[in-house]
Image (cartoon, grey):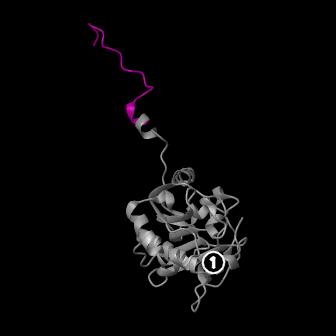
Amino acid sequence: MHLDVVDLRAFYYRTPLGRRAKTALQDSLRALWPKVKDETVAGFGFTAPMLRPFLAEARRVICLMPGQQGVMPWPPGGPNTSVLTEETGWPLPTGFVDRLVIGHGLETCEQPGALLDEIWRVLAPGGRVVFVLPNRSGLWARRDGTPFGYGRPYSFGQIDADLRRHRFSAERHAASLYFPPSHRQFVLRTAPAWERVGQRVGASRLAGAILVEAAKQVYVLPRNGARESARRPFEILEGLTKPAKPVAGRV
C-alpha cells in the first residue's frame, strides 16, 4: 500500500522528526555517492527529500512518482523535474540513468519483481542503484507514525537475495536513522549524536533504514559453465577416422 504524496510531503517538510530524518538520509546517501558530476540521477517513490543535494552537481535529476502515491512539483522555486508514472513502466529510455535511488517504492510495490526488472532496464551499463528500505529489526518499522512503518521491512539478507534473482549484485551496505522515531525535543536535539555513534559502532540492526547499493549485471555466465567446458580438451578432427598404422612390407 502506497502512502499518499500529501502525507509524505507533510512528514518530511513540516514535522521536526521528518526534517531530521531527511538530513540523516541525505548524509548517508551522500557518503555512498560523494560525486555525481555530469551524471543522470533519478529517484523512484518519494525521493525528493534525498535527492536535493545532487541538484547543483548532476547533469539532470528526475523524480519518478508512482500513480498510486501521487505527484507533487519539485524542486520548489525551479523548473519542475518530477513525473507521474506507472509503477513498473517508466517513461525513460533503456540505459538512460547513471544513478538511481529507490525510496518508499519497493517495500510498498504490489509487483516488486516487475519493479526490479524495470530498474534494471533503465540503468546504464555500470550504473548504480541505492535502495532505501525500512529495517526489519529497527524501531522505525514498528511505528506507523512515520513512512517507514508501512510496507514490507527488509533485512540485508532479504534484499540481497531479491537483487541476485533480478540480475543485480549488492556492492555496499549502509544504515541510517539511528535515533528513535520520537517527536520529543530531547531526541530531536541529540539526533546528530545518535547518528554519529551508530555509524561509528556499526550498529545497523538498530537503525531505522538500511541502504543497499547494487550494480547492474550485464553479462551473467552459467555457473561453472566455462570451467566445465575447459576441462575437456578440444578435438579439432574429432569424428574423423584416425589413420591406420602402416603394415610391414607395404609401400
Residue at coordinates 47% horizontally, 59% vertically from top-left?
A: 204
Residue at coordinates 63% horizontally, 77% vertically from top-left?
A: 11
The residue tagged with tag 1: helix, strand or loop?
helix
Q: Nearer the viewer, residue 188 or 30?
A: 188
**Horizontal relation, residue 18 to residue 214: left or right:** right
Percent x, y of residue 231: 38, 32
Q: What span is colored magenta in the figure?
A: 229-251
Residue at coordinates 57% horizontally, 69% vertically from top-left?
A: 181
Height in image: 161 above or below 122?
above
Q: Is residue 238 visible?
A: yes
Q: Quadrant of the N terminus?
A: bottom right
Residue 247 is one of the magenta-drawn residues = yes
Residue 248 is one of the magenta-drawn residues = yes
**Horizontal relation, residue 192 to residue 139: left or right:** left
Q: Nearer the viewer, residue 75 or 61?
A: 75
Circle 1 is placed at which residue position?
11
Principal secondary structure, stretch drawn in magenta: loop
